[in-house]
Amino acid sequence: DVKVTQSSRYLVKRTGEKVFLECVQDMDHENMFWYRQDPGLGLRLIYFSYDVKMKEKGDIPEGYSVSREKKERFSLILESASTNQTSMYLCASSFLRVRGSLSYEQYFGPGTRLTVT
Amino acid sequence: QKEVEQDPGPLSVPEGAIVSLNCTYSNSAFQYFMWYRQYSRKGPELLMYTYSSGNKEDGRFTAQVDKSSKYISLFIRDSQPSDSATYLCAMNSGGYQKVTFGTGTKLQVIP
């Protein structure tokens, strides 16, 4: 079974704090993703990474950064948390290719519900 | 206009009913189509994955893609209370890892 774990289920932080969200996958997936999920807006991609030390901006990267020092671990960093970053944060991972074809099947972690006050 | 449109529901059905969940999309380049199920306070889990047009069946679930109409469906037969969840459609045009998600339809199956 694919397992994607996230460091916290619930997190409460104050405005201006630096926040680290950690994600670990155990399937040797090349790709890792960070999304946020908000009511009525669905899942929005923040950043993704297709290899160690590689990162690509998603649709809403402003206010976030990421780090991927090891293949199995992908961190999301909120440099200075703001109230509009209160959200559910979801990490996902996937293989780059399956049976020679590009793969789009993403496996998600349980999510971190972040509240910024 | 959003690239992927999905009715948010909620959709309430009695146990045993056939459920039809749908998404429409505007990007004709989409070729890979997925359905995810998300229980409350959990991450989405992949249910079905199809490529291009046609049907795919897995147990009580059938995924249908009509590229000519830019319309995809997920059918659930003999619905169970344990099917109560939010269902998200997702799609991709190929050649790039980004997946576009619908906003999800909340389904409630009443015992």
Image: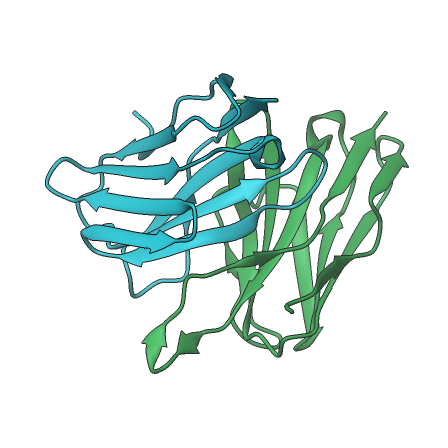
Among the chains pictured, the one given green colouring is A
Q: Residue at x 66, y 54 (%)?
A: A65
On the image, which quarter does residue A39 sit in? top right
Is residue B5 at all visible to an observer of this figure? no
Q: Nearer the viewer, residue A48 or B24?
A: B24
Based on the displayed image, in which of its 4 quarters is residue A71 positioned? Answer: bottom right
Q: Residue at x 81, y 52 (%)?
A: A20
* Res. A107 image quadrant: bottom right
State the hue of chain B: cyan
Q: Position of residue B62 (x, y in %)?
A: 34, 46
**Residue A4 showing in the rendered view:** yes
Q: Is residue A73 left or right of residue A95?
A: right
Nearer to me, B15 or B46: B15
Which residue is nearer to you in this view: A11 or B62? B62
Q: Position of residue A91 (x, y in %)?
A: 65, 54
Tell me the residue at 47%/31% (across/down): B103
Which colour scheme appears in the figure? by chain
Residue furthest left as drawn: B68
Question: Is residue B111 depicted above or below B24 in this figure?
Answer: above
Tell me which residue sits at (29%, 25%) in the image. B1
Name the image quarter holding the C terminus of chain A.
top right
Report whether A114 appears left or right of A32: right
Quarter of the N terminus of chain A within the rendering: bottom right
B63 is higher (above) or lower (below) than A101: above
